Image: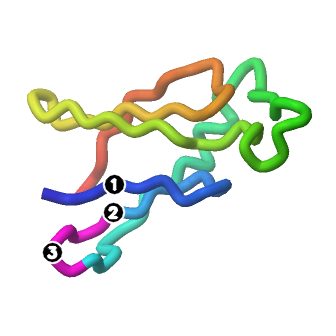
Amino acid sequence: GKVYANIWQQDRIAIIQPDSGEITGWIDLSELRHRLVPAPQDVEGLGAYGKAVANGIAYDEAEDRLFVTGKNWPRLFEIRLRN
């Protein structure tokens, strides 16, 4: 019942209440960068569109978990949210 949205060029996700548009929480992905080996590289010649930024979110309702990744990231992460 919530919307999860990447914040452009930031390592965080906004949790949004769809009926009001209110941001009700944040997911900080900055710690994941330390686990990216090799480190993601920006793509030359594409400006902001070539940045190695967080940009992929998928929710698995059956297991109540999120998968996150990013543009040019070499890994996919499974994360679980704490209430």
At 90% across and 35% down in the image, what residue appears? 45
The residue that label 2 is drawn on is 15
Q: Nearer the viewer, residue 16 or 27?
A: 16
Q: Amino acid at mark 2?
A: Ile
Residue 31, magenta (yes or no): no
Q: Position of residue 1 (x, y in %)?
A: 12, 57
- The reply to whether dot 1 and dot 2 touch (C-beta < 8 Å) is yes
Q: CA distance from mark 1 to mark 2?
A: 5 Å
Q: Amino acid at mark 3?
A: Asp
**Quarter-of-image position of residue 70:** top right
Q: Amino acid at mark 1?
A: Tyr
Residue 18, magenta (yes or no): yes
Tag 2 secondary structure = strand
Stretch in magenta: 16-20
Say left or right for 29 vs 5: right
The residue that label 3 is drawn on is 19
In the image, residue 4 sits, relative to residue 70, either above or below, namely: below
Foreground disc of the pair 2, 3: 3
Q: CA distance from mark 1 to mark 3?
A: 14 Å
Q: CA distance from mark 2 to mark 3?
A: 12 Å
Sequence order check, earlier mark of 1 and 3: 1
**Quarter-of-image position of residue 34:** top right
Q: Residues within 10 Å of mark 3 (few under 14, many from 20)?
A: few
The residue that label 1 is drawn on is 4
